[in-house]
Amino acid sequence: MALRSSIWGFLVFLLLEGLLLAQQPGVPDTGTIVTRMMAVRRQNHDRIRAYTVKRDYQLFDKQSQPKAQVVADITYLPPDQKQYRIESSSGGLGERILRDILAKETEPSKEAQRKEISPENYDFKFVNEETFNGRHCFVLSMQPKRQEKDMLRGKLWVDAETYNLYRIEGQVVKSPSWWVRDLYILMSFACIDGVWLHTATHAVADIRFKGKYVMDSHDMQYSPAPQATAFARNPYH
C-alpha cells in the first residue's frame, strides 16, 4: 500500500509540474507556437522577391577529406520557379552526386503541401527552451504522420519573440534510394535583406559499401534576379 501511494504521489507531482510549465508566462502551448510560426512563414513567403544566390556545395568522405565541389548560381522567381547555372565543379563521381542534389533542389515542387512543416504533416510536442545564436527559442519535436521521402523525424527551433524558424534537424524517415541509409539533415535559416531564407544545409548519410559521407551547402552571395521575361526566354542550364 505504501509503495502504491508513493507511485500515485509521484504521478500527481509530474502532472502538476506539467500544468505549471504550460501556465508559465512566455511559454505558449505547442499549438499556439506552431500556428504563429506558420503565419510568420506565410507572411515571409509573400515578401520574397526575385533573387539570385551563389551557393557552394561540398562533399566529404568518412575521413573528412573533400571529394567534390559545385558552385552554382540559383535564381528564384516567385512563386515557385527556380533555375540554376553551374559556375564551377570538380570531383568525378562526387560531382555527379552534388549535381543531382542541385537539380532536385531546383525542380518544381510537387505536392508541396504534403512536405510542409505543418500539423497536417507532423505531430509537434514542446521539448524545452534554448538560446540559439543569441536568441531565445522554443524547441519542438516533430514526428511525421506518414513514412514518405523528404519527411523528417527530429526537432525544430522557433524564435520565441518573432516566431521565425531558425533551425531544423532530423532523420529522414524513408531513404531516398537503396544506396543511401540513415540520412541525417540539418537546415539553418537566416534573415537576408528583411526576408527569412534557408541559407545552409548539413547532411550526413551512410552510403552502402562506401561508409559515411557528408554534404555541406551554404549561400555565399545574393543579388537581384534578372527580369522575369528575360529569365523565361533564356533559362539557365
Image: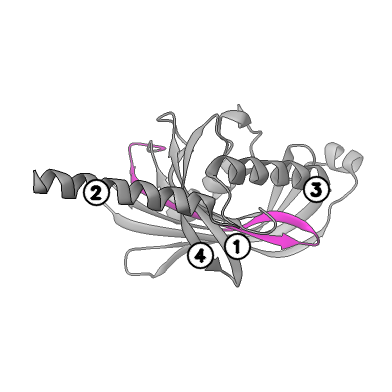
Foreground tag (2 vs 3): 2
Q: Label 4 vs label 3: CA separation?
A: 28 Å
- At label 2, counting other C-alpha atoms closer than 10 Å, the crowd grade (few under 14, some 14-19, many 20 or more) is few
**Residue 48 numbered tag:** 3
Q: Is residue 170 left or right of residue 23?
A: left
Amino acid type shown at disc 3: Ile
What residue is disc 2 on? 9
- At label 3, counting other C-alpha atoms closer than 10 Å, the crowd grade (few under 14, some 14-19, many 20 or more) is some
For the point 64% across and 40% down, which residue is it?
A: 35
In the image shown, does 51 or 46 lie closer to the viewer? 46
Q: Label 1 vs label 4: CA separation?
A: 24 Å
Q: Is residue 198 magenta?
A: yes
Percent position of residue 233, x then y: 86, 37
Percent position of residue 73, x then y: 71, 56
User: Magenta part mainly helix, strand or loop?
Assistant: strand
Amino acid type shown at disc 2: Gly
For residue 178, above or below residue 14: above
Percent position of residue 52, x then y: 77, 54
What residue is disc 1 on? 218
For residue 73, above or below residue 64: above
Which contiguous range is marked in magenta? Answer: 176-200
| Disc 4, SS | strand
Foreground tag (2 vs 1): 2
Q: In the rendered structure, which disc, 4 or 3, sits on the residue that comes first in sequence?
A: 3
Amino acid type shown at disc 4: Glu
Q: In the rendered structure, which disc, 3 or 1, sits on the residue that comes first in sequence?
A: 3
Please state, as top left, top right, bottom left or bottom right, where the C terminus lies in the image.
top right
